[in-house]
Amino acid sequence: SKGITTAMRRALDSTPLVAGLSPEERTELWLALPAPEGFEKDASLYTQHAFRHALGLMAAGEAQVYRVGTDGRRSAMTRLRPGSLFGAAALFGGGESYVTDVVAKTRCAVVFLPEPQLVSLLRSDWRLCENYLRFLTGRVRFLNQRIDGFTGGQAEERLLWFLCRHSDDEGRVELPCPLTALAQLLDIGRSSLYRSLRELSDQGLLRRDGKTIYMMQRREDT
């Protein structure tokens, strides 16, 4: 089984890539893939300059995807959990640099599907191809939502969107910059940002303690 445990098999079975395949077909597929590779907590899976031209399948553990700014600061984006896919931007002419950093938040295991093998699989079964296209479409929609969060909406909505996207599992956000810089990042006035913080606090949606903000109610629709 190439080191794939029962728990890993369940995680891999949940990836969007294999939707619609029978248990027997999924088993045959996993047996054809490379063995999972293990990573310790805080290890880098992908960085901007150290990555693989491969699709990563999370078999165990969790990892965090970060967008790295020109100043080197990281902004948390997507949390990867068992069954998640990552690395699509490194495929099909992805270039010599990657778009994000992917860091293990716990001990984790990843199955890396090299581009040539992925191409072969997509050619062999239209269902796999359709599933992969559906996955990419979902990523496009997610990125468009992020763009909309910065380009439209009222100050409170932009602030809530930013806080929800950067909060940890307990709803805590460590502000990466002073409020003046945050206002510029969100493209709103400094006074509008302070007013939004005060109004959201009055509504019981957040509590501020210096540079730490606690989300009192997680808004899944933002």
Image (cartoon, grey):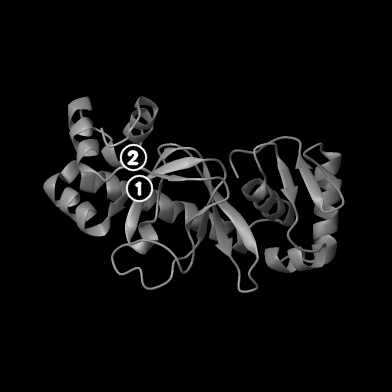
- Near-viewer residue (93 or 42): 42
Above or below residue 164? Residue 82 is: above
Amino acid beneath label 2: Pro
- Near-viewer residue (125 or 72): 72
The circle drawn on residue 107 is none
In the rendered image, which quarter is residue 24 located in?
top left
Amino acid beneath label 1: Phe
* Left or right: where 219 falls relative to 175: left
Above or below residue 202? Residue 119 is: below
Per the image, label 2 sits on a secondary structure element best described as: helix
* Left or right: where 147 falls relative to 50: right
Q: Residue furthest left?
A: 124
The circle drawn on residue 16 is 2
Sort mark 1 into few (<14), some (14-19) or many (20+) by Cα contacts within 10 Å.
some
Residue 37: image location, x then y, percent: 38, 45
Residue 45: image location, x then y, percent: 47, 54
* Left or right: where 190 falls relative to 173: right
Q: Does label 1 or label 2 sit earlier along the sequence? A: 2
Residue shown at 39% from the left, 56% from the top: 87
Residue designated by label 1: 135
Q: Quadrant of the C terminus?
A: top right
Q: Given contact means CB atoms under 8 Å apart, are the residues at marks 1 and 2 in contact?
A: yes
In the rendered image, which quarter is residue 192 located in?
bottom right
Residue shown at 63% from the left, 69% from the top: 72
